[in-house]
Amino acid sequence: MNYNGYCLHSGFLGREGQEKLLLRIRDLLQDAPLYTPQMPRTGKPMSVRMSNCGTLGWVSDKQGYRYQEYHPENRIPWPAIPQILLDIWAGLAGYSAPPEACLINYYDAKARLGLHVDKDEIDMKAPIVSISLGDTALFRMGGTGRRDPTRSVRIISGDVMIMAGPARRCYHGVDRIYPGTSSLLAEGGRFNLTLRRVSTP
Ligand code: MD3
Ligand code: FE
């Protein structure tokens, strides 16, 4: 599937690859624990919990959205992006510069992510590469306008999505998680990892 720069590599990671990657993620979450981001201004908690790895991480609190070099709670610099993820980027992104940020989203059975556009990156020409681990998600993608028609796609564990070109500026979100659809995470739920270039190379 590939239209307008959106590309879904279904089943890109097999079970072994998923398990290996999950171990690396669990390991780095010990140093950079998942935290509950807040919505800008209102401070309302988001249902998705987050962390990051890379030289920069995306954070959100009452002050707003931004990329910063350290964890918002423990103030420690983000851990490095695991080599497995750098390899996936190198193989699929079609972009010479490496990613600077990897946002780690964790969805429990009730978490959702409303329709939004990712536009805090200075380098909007670089693609975003997303990897899903755990329960199936209902992902929704629209156009560049908030009211444009949308399409829904089920994303399963091991799927890798690339958003490049026009798709990079499209509205998208996660409507729901289907609990119990994967045995990968003992605790259930879903991790989504998004590799991003923030500054221009
Ligand atoms: C389409 N995450 O972290 S990943 C996000 O499943 C985010 O956690 C979702 O949207 C998740 O910002 C979707 C796939 C994704 C990421 C970035 C995109 C799709 C995108 C940027 C433009 C268009
Ligand atoms: Fe997004």
Image (cartoon, rainbow, N blue to C red):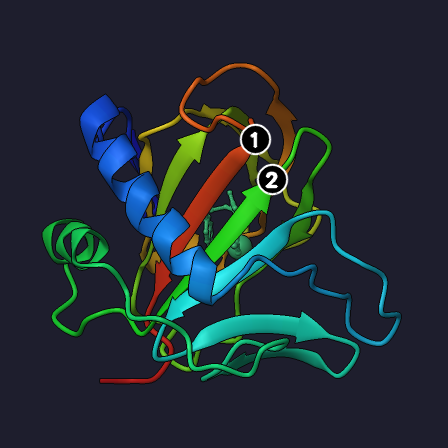
Secondary structure of residue under mark 2: strand
Specify whether tag 2 is near ligand 1 (CB below 8 Å).
Answer: yes
Residues 54 and 98: in front is: 54
Could you tell me which residue is drawn at 64 percent across and 61 percent down?
35
Taking the image as shown, residue 120 lies to the left or right of residue 6, namely right
Rendered view: 114 above or below 1: below
Residue 184 appears in the picture as rendered? yes
Q: Position of residue 28 (x, y in %)?
A: 38, 59
Residue 142 appears in the picture as rendered? no
Could you tell me which residue is drawn at 25 percent across and 23 percent down?
15
Rendered view: 186 above or below 114: above
Label 2–label 1 contact, CB within 8 A: yes
- The type of residue carrying mark 1 is Gly
Rendered view: 158 above or below 192: above
- The type of residue carrying mark 2 is Tyr
Numbered badge on residue 189:
1
Identify the residue position indicated by label 2 in the image.
Answer: 107
Secondary structure of residue under mark 1: loop
| Residue 102 figure quarter | bottom left
